[in-house]
Structure formats: C-alpha cells, structure tokens
Amino acid sequence: MLVKVFVTLKEGVLDPQGKAVQNSLHSLGFGAVQDVRVGKYLELHMDVSAAEDAEQQARRMCDKLLANPVIEDYRFEILEPAE
Amino acid sequence: MLVKVFVTLKEGVLDPQGKAVQNSLHSLGFGAVQDVRVGKYLELHMDVSAAEDAEQQARRMCDKLLANPVIEDYRFEILEPAE
Amino acid sequence: MRWGVAVFPGSCDDDDVLHCLRNVLGQDVRTLWHKDPFPGGCDGVVLPGGFSYGDYLRAGAMARFSPVMQGIVDFAGSGGLVLGICNGFQILCESGLLPGALTRNASLRFVCRRVYLRVEDNRSPFTRLAEPGELLEMPVKHGEGRYYANPATLKQLDDNGQVLLRYADAAGEVSEEANPNGSADGIAGICNRARNVFGLMPHPEDATEAVLGGESGLKIFSSMVDEIRRGSGS
Amino acid sequence: MSGGTTKDGTAGGTPGNGAASTNLDAAPVTPEVVQAHGLTEDEYDEIRRLLGREPSLTELGVFSVMWSEHCSYKSSRRHLKHFPTQGARVIHGPGENAGVMDIGDGLAVVFKIESHNHPSFIEPYQGAATGVGGILRDVFTMGARPIASLNSLRFGDVRHPKTPYLVNGVVGGIGGYGNCIGVPTVGGDIYFDECYDANILVNAFTLGLVERDRIFTGKASGAGNPVVYVGSKTGRDGVHGATMASESFSEGSEQRRPTVQVGDPFTEKLLLEACLELMKTDAIVGIQDMGAAGLTSSAVEMAGRGGSGVELELSHVPLREQGMTPYEILLSESQERMLLVARPESVEQLQAIFQRWDLDAVVVGRVIDEPVFRVLSEGREVAAIPVAALTDAAPTYDRPAARPARQDEVQRLDEAALPQPENMNRVLEQLLESPNIASREWVYRQYDHYVRSNTVVAPGGDAAVVRIKGTSRGLALTVDCNGRFCYLDPHLGGMAAVAEAARNLACVGATPLGLTDCLNFGNPEKEEVMWQFSQAILGMREACLALDIPVVSGNVSFYNETEGVSIHPTPTVAMVGLLEDVERIARPWFKEEGDLVVLLGSNRGELGGSEYLKVVHDRVAGRPPAMDLTLERGVQRTCRAAVEAGLLSSAHDVSEGGLAVALAEACFGDPGIGAVIDVEPEGRPDVLLFGESQSRIVVSLKKQDYARLQELASTENTSCEVIGRVGGTRLVIGNMVRARVDHLKNLWSTALERCVK
Ligand SMILES: Nc1ncnc2c1ncn2[C@@H]1O[C@H](COP(=O)(O)OP(=O)(O)O)[C@@H](O)[C@H]1O
Ligand SMILES: [Mg+2]
C-alpha cells in the first residue's frame, strides 16, 4: 500500500520559503505566478492489506509525527497496489 | 489555475530524512512502514486561463528552478478553477 | 591584482573573505553586488558563504539567476579563477560550473566544527602551494554539505584529479568519523575539469590568523595569489 | 522601563479563545471582554478616568498590551530600581532598547537578553527562532552591528517524554535563525530539571558593536516628521494569542498554538543590512523594532521618549492577509518589522536603500505635537489615547511578598544521614554523564560560532572570546544562573549568579564591563514568588556592588509555572568583559606535563544544592554555598592579574560537580592530559570532591612562575595552594579517584547526545 502525505502550512501562517520562491519566479519572468506555498510531500510504503487499516495508521502518523499541528495541516491519499 | 508540484529525490540518491522519519515511525509502533521518501510539495497559484499555458510554464519553472535534475525528479498536476 | 567578492542577499561570510583578502593578504578587493552586471577587470572571484536567498528551496538554487552570477559564469568560461566557499560551492554546483550537488547533511543537523582536510592534488591554482597529503585545518559550518554525484561522475573526478580536498582525521586518514556530513568519498572540495573553478564546504577565510586558531586557510588564498601573479607576469 | 520588542510571545492582553474575529471594532466592551483582555476592574476604571470616556474595543486592545506585565513591568518596576546602573563606561542603561557601554577606541558595545519562554514551549523551533530574531532587532535598532549571540536554556527532566522534542526544536530554531543571519552564537548555558518540565526557559542574548558617535535611539521627535514602516508585511500573527506571557500555563494552553509567529531569518538579514546602511546617513531621527504589541508599542514608546505624539494611518500599512481590522493591525506581532521616524527630505533616500534590499518602506504616519497616540483607518479615527496614559500612567503594583513556610524545610540537610557512596570513581563518572555537567558540544555544534572571523575562544570554555577587528582588544561573554541555588535561597542564588558570571570572565582574563539579566520567575501574584523575586534582586545587587558591575539592560519574565507549580527562580545573568590584549587569555585545559595545579580560593565542604546531591541522592536541599564577596573579588582579581601577566597555562572555575568535576574537565583538552592531585578530605570524601563551594578557580602554571602567582594572591589576600601536578594519562585525586582521562572524556562528551537524541 502506498500512502502519499501532503503537509502544508496552515492558512495565515507566514511561508517565507514560498515568498522567496515566488520572488525568484517573478524575476525569472514567470509573472503569472500569484502565490506560492511550499510544503512537504512524503511517500510511505506500508505493509498492510486493508485500505482502512492504512488510512487509520496514516492519520495517526500524521497527528503524532508527520505534521506539526501548531502550524501545519495535512492531507493524504492511499494507493492500493495495482495487481 | 492551481499547479501542484511534487519534487522527489531520484532513485539511488540517499534520503536521510526519509530514513529518520521511518525510524521514528517504527519506534512509535508503526512497524508496517517499510520505506519512507521525503520530498517537496509546492502549490503555485497562477493567473493564466489556458491549461496548456499553465502546463508549459510549470514545466519550465521546474526545469529551471524548482527541481535540481542532478538529484531530483518532479511531477505536477494542474487544477482548473471549479467555476 | 584585483579581486571581486560576490554579495547576494543573505550572504554572511562576505565580510570574512573581504577581511582576509584585504587586511591579511593586502589585496585589492571590491564587492560585486548581485543586482549589478559583472564588472570585469577581476583576476579572481570569490563566492562567499551564507544563506543566499535564505537557502530556501535548495541551498544556492536562486543565486545562480542573479545578474552578477551570469557574468561570473562567463568569466569562469573564459578561464577566470572562481572560488566558491560553502554557499558559494552550492551556487557553483547549481549553476553547473561544478558537477554534482550538495545535499542535506546525513545527520540532518547543521554542523559547526573544526576539521582536517587532506590535500589530494596540488596541481591546481588553489592548492599549488600545498603538498599532496598535507593537512589543513579549518572550520566547517553548514547544514547542506553532503556532496553527491553519481558513480560515473565520482570516477571522473578521481581520474582527472579534480578532488582537491578530502575530510581526514588528525593522522591524515580519510574516514567516516572524520567526515562531518556524509559526503561521498569524503569529498570536501572539487574543481572543474579546466581547473579554474573550485568549490569547497570548509571555510579557509576563517583560518587565516593565528589568533583565530590557525592559518592553514591561507594556503588556498596564497595559492591563488601566486597563480594570478604568475599568469599576469607581475 | 518600557515594552516593545519580541519578548515572551505576545505582550498579553488580546482575547484568548477566538473572541478576536474580524468584527472586533464594533463589538461592545462588556466586563467579560475587559477580563478577557487581562485587565482588572480597577484598571478598567482607571482607563475610563484617563480617557474621560469609555474606550472603544480597539483602544481597549491597545491598553491591554501596553499595560500588560510584559510591557509595563507593573509588578517588577519598583524592585528593578535596586540594580546599580551607573558606571564610568555606561552610555545608556536600562530604558533604551539595549544597554550601551563604552569600550574605548571610539567604540561601544550594545547588549541585551530577552526571554521567549512560552512561545518556545508551544512551538519550540519557531518560538526559539523568533526569540533570536527579536533580540537581534533590539541591538541593531541602536545602530550596532550584532557580532555575537548567547542563549540560556532550561528544560525539564531529560527523562520526561517531551524533553528531547523540545530540546531538538529549540536548539534547531536558535541555529536555524542565528546561523542564517551571520551572527556567531558563541556561548550559552543549558540545564535540565523537572521544575521546567512544562515551562521551559529560552533566553536569547545578542551583543553588537557601534561607533560611539553613531548610536541611535527609539525616539519620535519633530512634529511633521514622517513615520515609516519597514520590513515584512503584517499578518494576523500573534493577534489571536491570549495573554501568553502574562498568564500561567494550564491544560488547554497548547490549543493556542496558532498564535505562534514564524520567523523569516532571510528577511531579518536584509532588514539588518538595510538598517545599518541607512544609519550611515542622517536620514532618520529615531528607530525602533516592532516586537511584542508590534506597531502599537513601537509607536507609543517612541512618542513617549520623544515627548511627542504619533498619528498613524492604518490603510498604508503593508498587509499580508485580507480583511484585517484596525485592532488586528495594531496588535499584530508579525516578525521582522521596524518603525522609523525620518527627516521629511530624506524619505526618498530611505526608500531607495530599502528597495535596494527588496524591502517595503512605507510612510504610515507622522509625528505630532499633541502628545497623543492617534490612529486613523482611511481617515476615520479608531483610537486616540494620550501617550502618557499608555506609558507613565500604566499601573504599578507593590505586590505582597512573603517567605514561604516551607523554606526552612527545604534548607534542611543532615549530611551525616546521607549514605556514603563507596566508589568515588563511579560517582565522578555519574556526574560527568549528568546532562547538567556533560559536554554541551552536541548543542553548540549546531550553531555557527565562527562567522565574522572574530572568534578566539569558541563555545566550550568558561567564557567565549571575540576579538575586535582593528584593535588589540577582545570581548569575553558568558551567561550563568544556578536555579537550584536560587530556589534554596534566592538571595544567595542571585549573588552566586552574578559572581559566577564574573568568575567565568576572570578565568579567561577579562574585566567585567556590565551585565544584562533575564529574571525568569513564577506568578507575581503569589507572595512567595514576589519574595523570591525581591530577594534575588537584592542578592544580585550586592554582588554587582562588590564586584563593581553595572546592570545596563534586562528583561522580566513572570508567570513561569504550570498547574500552579513555579519553576525555580532563574535570574539569568549575561555578562560582558573586556580584554585589553586579546592574545593574553587563558583556557580551561591543562597543557604542559609537569605544570603545577593550583587552587585559588578554598575548599569549604558545602554540599547544599549540589548536582551531586541531586544525581546521587535525588535531593534538592540544604543551603547553597555561602558567598564571601571579598574573597570572590580577591580570587577573580588574582586570576585576572595572573592571566594578564602571562603566568597561567590554564584557568577553570569550580562550579556544578565541584572540585573533582572541575579537575576532570581541565584534563579534557585536545589532546587530553592527566593530573595527579594531592588532597585529603577532612571529613567525608564526597563533600570535598563534589561540594560546590564558591570562589574557587583551578589554575595550572610552570613551577618557576608559582612565586609570582603567590605574590599576586597575597596582594589580594587570597589563598593560593598547590594541589598537584599535570601529567600522565590518568586523573588521580588522593586515594579517592583514579581513572583514565580518555575513558572519562568519552563518557562526558557523549552523554548529552545520548540523553536528548
Ligand atoms: N531585569 C531588568 N534589569 C534591568 N533592566 C531591565 C530589566 N528588565 C527590563 N529592563 C530594561 O527595561 C527596558 C525595557 O525592557 P523591555 O521592554 O524588555 O525592552 P524592549 O522594549 O527593548 O524589549 C529595557 O531598557 C530593559 O533593558
Ligand atoms: Mg526593543
């Protein structure tokens, strides 16, 4: 089972990295870019067979470790092996 | 237009952060996690109307700045506004 | 003889390099502001350490697009001497002037400590006054200094004698213990094939006076001074 | 004393749980709203009296932050008056953004320490990072280039499940911010005790260098002069934050997490460079960082100092978020912002400089004659408050203080009843592995301590030393406080904090210039906390007077408690010393085979409050070691004179872990070297080896120089006794300790990492 986790800064929390990337993109001529937010992307390969199980564990892993609830939100997707 | 960019380490490039996350997850009791890779996730809000345009620009931004081809791969998705 | 020290937003060790070149070595130095075009008339250029553009996204990624950097790339292409220290090394790799990439330290932590460096090759303008095998001592201080290149590139670097410095212990042995960041093959500094561009993670400019604990960083700068003097016949 | 920078999180005072939403300005001021702003009924009545009417909600918000403990020093002000603040070298004492002292050669140093305790507990990385950012701004706002930082940290028991997470976050944050700015972090201290389990301490110090005649102050003067906002845009950071710094922790306070600000060291670096560039011109008359209570306190404080008023137009303030109300804009604690008062003809020049550094610089108001803080939003007046009502008229309290009944109990220690450990080697090992004694290298390795190429003594010594380029001089820096001593006897503990800091400076050979303090205490509304507070200050005062050290700046952090239990009183002292010749210094480590080992001061066999008692007997008890300030002064002067005369191979003071630990540490140079020490216990060996009597320094020197050292000591009436010789690969102390140096050093150097990783 593959779990894809997206961790992003909460709305309203300053994202200095996003701001810097945006400025750079502007000076490279990509003027259409209006806002950039930078977050984390994790791929977890899990040895579980039931999607609900993966889901439950993913939620707990995010709450406990992968995201910092003070300033970050998370979202995840579960991909079952193709077979 | 929202462009979501995923930047991941190339296969074969050591990912100490992924390893560290995996170890932490194990010690938290998530033994089913077999492998973790950590990458970057960017959301770019773009003021363009055509999806192809967004796509073209996204590719160029990734090639030029957002990913380092020596160590990283990228992938992106384009989301048109719901309307 | 004229030196240029590039200053990007977020450069931190620019003053250190200026001090070393100007006050310790008595050189004629000017700063090169990132927004200005490269002025030319330089015999040597230094890209100093620091956190250009905050090191956001990837260390050194954004600096390569600055106007001054475009000129420095041309300067290097025409054989000019370019030294990149720490963030400067990262910028050189991002700009493609040096192969490979500098990635997050294996420890995932910033590391600041003194290290020994073994001179692997003195056939370069940057190490010509050193002996092969000689040990230099100077600080490292970085969070992203783990040199990475694919195996083919690493082999080429070795075959061409492009690895100028490796992390070593006090006895001169290259070992895992002595490697502060997990760099491939203990690599601390490499030059390009043409041998006029050199990047290293350690900070020679912070080891140029006895009162600061040692002078072995002078070897690098004095080698460059010597090279330039010979080249210009002055 | 006044408020005005990033301090302990928010200045305190905005509603706690979601009350601050977008439509605050229109909401009525009910008693609940007043209470939610941390104001008492009496205080509210006083506000009405001062205004001659009811305040609007926006005005209430302004009062609440300006009258918070944090900005107004309402509980501490009358006690702080006891500090000696005068001295020949003092240029600016308390009252400015940071203290300023003359160091000769036309130069001055600017320094200050600040707490960021509560934010760091809630979000350790960002809390610590923004703490560093705040103190940097306090220093460069005076025109000084920051050249060295320190930090003082207190965490809970290492075995507490949260401790490693907090330590990693805080250390990472300090490094992440400080390294990126290019200011070396050259020292600090870190201790663990369960009293800090749920209330850690993060105190950050920065020192800057400035030309004597280029010092800037935070003053708004000259009616009509434009008020200019520079730096990052304003967001809602901190606005929702409750009275974090002025309120104790309780269950649920972790839920206030969204209040924590995120630091942007890159922007701070640009701001630093732009401000210093601007300060080479004559474009500005005053400048002040925006920290706690942001725009409000910086504008009000500048007006207060200038005896003028300020009028702001909020629609000009650069905003990061949409739909922000005047209330939010005024109270936002977004980081990396400054407020300037410019000369009208210089605005363009000023803006050109900031543009060069890619920073916003916007005129947001002007200085007015009428001493009023007037705020407009698109021309509509949203607040108009007499400046004095926010500054001089802020309440002050003489809070009741009483020695707690349990103090006698706490000080009781029956040494005879303590079981005596059999194996002193083992005890020494245990102490060297204590996280309070083990090497701190794991921490300072994560800080750049070399940038700016001035670092002569890096972290690891008794005091850090940086040279001053262009002169032969150097500065020595240290930060100290033994919270356990302060808990057992706050008066003695306060004295000891000052004495120890000065002793550390003496060890490298420096003469103390002055100090800055960060007084971390519990809830001032409790009598015993006020007693601890007042006692500690009096103790510090005594030591300052005896050792001739003025207090030039500082900070108070109250409400450090959790679930009603206070931390140990922790009056952290950061001290700065001057070295006339930066090459004439001593380091802690034995150097030469055959050197004599000499003890300055004497072993008095005091076990109270020692690390040994805690580690081996799990007790925090007894009276802390006595302080004899005359002896202290003599020991320090002797050591300093000996360093200056070039007599010493090494000097290291005796502190946590006592004589045995001090000797072991002196063996841990690079490479290590042993020593044979010949001392005999009069009573119990543990008391001699591990007692923490004050006023002791272990030095080593060539045999032929001993007579001269004796001479120096006798001039100072100080005892000075040969206790052994340097040499070999073992540390041998009488027949009590015998261990290989490499073995001890290995335990000592790896222990902290093992605890917190
Ligand atoms: N414990 C203290 N000892 C001496 N001075 C203090 C103390 N606490 C605060 N001060 C002084 O009071 C003034 C106001 O303090 P503070 O509000 O923390 O300063 P800032 O506005 O720069 O943050 C400063 O000059 C500070 O040095
Ligand atoms: Mg201030």
Image (spheres, coloured by chain):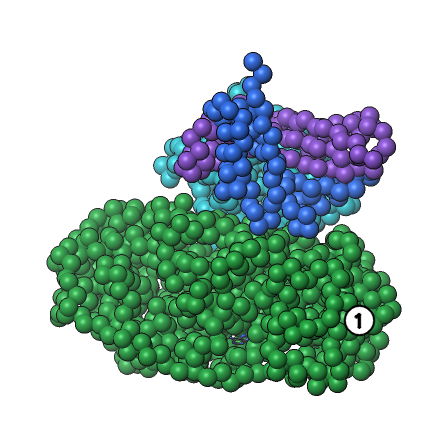
Chain colours: A blue, B purple, C cyan, D green
Determine if residue D486 is in view: yes
Could you say which quadrant of the image residue D331 lies in? bottom right
Determine if residue D88 is in view: no
Q: Is mark 1 within 8 Å of ligand 1?
A: no
Q: Secondary structure at mark 1?
A: strand
Q: Where is residue A47 shown, x and y percent of the image?
A: 47, 24
Chain label for disc 1: D
The single residue placed furthest to the top in the displayed view is A83
Foreground: C163 or D32? D32
Please tell me how crowded label 1 is: few (under 14), some (14-19), or many (20+) other residues with Cα within 10 Å.
some
Could you say which quadrant of the image residue D404 lies in? bottom left
User: Looking at the image, which residue is at 71% across and 46% down?
Assistant: A19
Foreground: D216 or D317? D317
Q: Where is residue D658 shown, x and y percent of the image?
A: 27, 64
User: Looking at the image, which residue is at 18% across and 70% down?
Assistant: D415
C60 is higher (above) or lower (below) than B34: below
Judge left or right: residue A57 versus residue D352.
Answer: left
Q: Where is residue C108 shown, x and y percent of the image?
A: 49, 40
Judge left or right: residue D17 versus residue C39.
Answer: left
Q: Where is residue A39 shown, x and y percent of the image?
A: 63, 39
C97 is higher (above) or lower (below) than D575: above
Q: Amino acid at mark 1?
A: Val
D400 is higher (above) or lower (below) than C122: below
Q: Quadrant of the N terminus of chain C?
A: top right
User: Looking at the image, which residue is at 74% across and 33% down?
Assistant: B3
D412 is higher (above) or lower (below) than A24: below
Q: Quadrant of the C terminus of chain C?
A: top right
User: Looking at the image, which residue is at 53% across and 20% down?
Assistant: C151
Foreground: D97 or D636? D97
Which residue is the site of mark 1? D382
